[in-house]
Amino acid sequence: MTADLIETLPLPQRLALSYAPRRNRDNVLALLALNARLSGIVRQQGEPVIAQMKLAWWRDRFAQDTSEWPVGEPLLALLSRYEGATEMLGSLVDGWEGLLSETLGRQEIEGFAGGHADAWSGMLNFSDKCGEEEAVRRAAEQWSLADLAMNLSDERERALTLERVRSIGQDQGRLPRSARSLTVLRGLALRALERGSSDLLDGPGAMAMALRLGVVGR
């Protein structure tokens, strides 16, 4: 089952997942697979109302206790064993839904970034490590916004997204080991932006960076 879910991930995310510590690898897979599912819903062709209905289904699940979830859906089955805060995943759904707006403004862009930050923070279950939590939140915002910018065709929307990425800053320090996959994704996304590339894995340099970030953490 997990192998099938891994196949749903874009190649850069599959690579990043390989650097997740064994103890929380299923949690990272669940979060990345959910993000990929939501991305597919939003980016599909068709009426926005259909996408909104599909997103609402996921939002409703995260407002329920896992014991009430329907059976037979592989991603839900994995999420039922999720060790993070499932209620925080509703914010990720909200962030993706904001992209269905006719035009993206600062509110939608902030919501998208915040949804990813909430999801990663909730997945790692921070308690009193406030400094680490803030670093993870900012890294999640950077990765999600950089990836979004590379997929926007509207120049105004792209400029607003890049403005938000740059406002976060570059050097956020080393993230906790449990967020190693996010470290890889953030590094690859920022590298691609700097190079004007739309491909996170655009050559040997990208693979070398992924290896360094995955092993060393910075």
Image (cartoon, grey):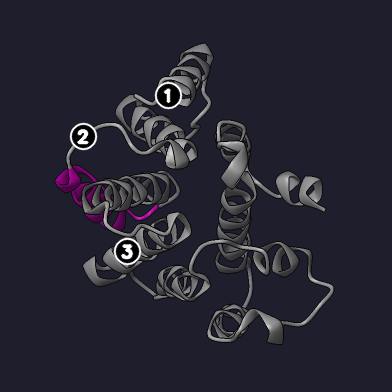
Residue 170, labelled with which disc? 2
Q: Residue 204 at x, y = what percent? A: 52, 12
**Callout 2 amino acid:** Gln
Please tell me whether residue 166 belongs to the stretch shown in magenta.
Answer: yes
Q: Residue 66 at x, y = what percent? A: 65, 79
Q: Earlier in the sequence, mark 1 or mark 2?
A: 2
**Callout 1 amino acid:** Leu
Residue 54, labelled with which disc? none
Q: Quadrant of residue 185?
A: top left
Q: Who's the residue at 45% across and 68% down the image?
A: 92
Task: Identify residue for label 3.
Answer: 114
Q: Residue 171 at x, y = what percent? A: 20, 32
Circle 3 Cα neighbour tier, 10 Å, few/some/many (<14 / 14–19 / ≥20): many
In the image, residue 75 sits, relative to residue 161, either above or below, namely below
Q: Nearer the viewer, residue 25 or 206?
A: 25
In the image, residue 58 sits, relative to residue 129, either above or below, namely below
The secondary structure type at the circle numbered 3 is: helix
Of marks 1 and 2, the one in the foreground: 1
Circle 2 Cα neighbour tier, 10 Å, few/some/many (<14 / 14–19 / ≥20): few
Q: Who's the residue at 32% across and 45% down the image?
A: 139
Cα separation, mark 1 vs mark 2, equals 15 Å
Instruction: State the extent of the magenta-drawn residues as a range.
Output: 153-168
Q: Earlier in the sequence, mark 3 or mark 2?
A: 3
Q: Who's the residue at 62% across and 50% down the image?
A: 29
Task: Identify residue for label 1.
Answer: 213
Q: Residue 4 at x, y = what percent? A: 80, 49
Q: Earlier in the sequence, mark 3 or mark 1?
A: 3
Of marks 3 and 1, the one in the foreground: 1
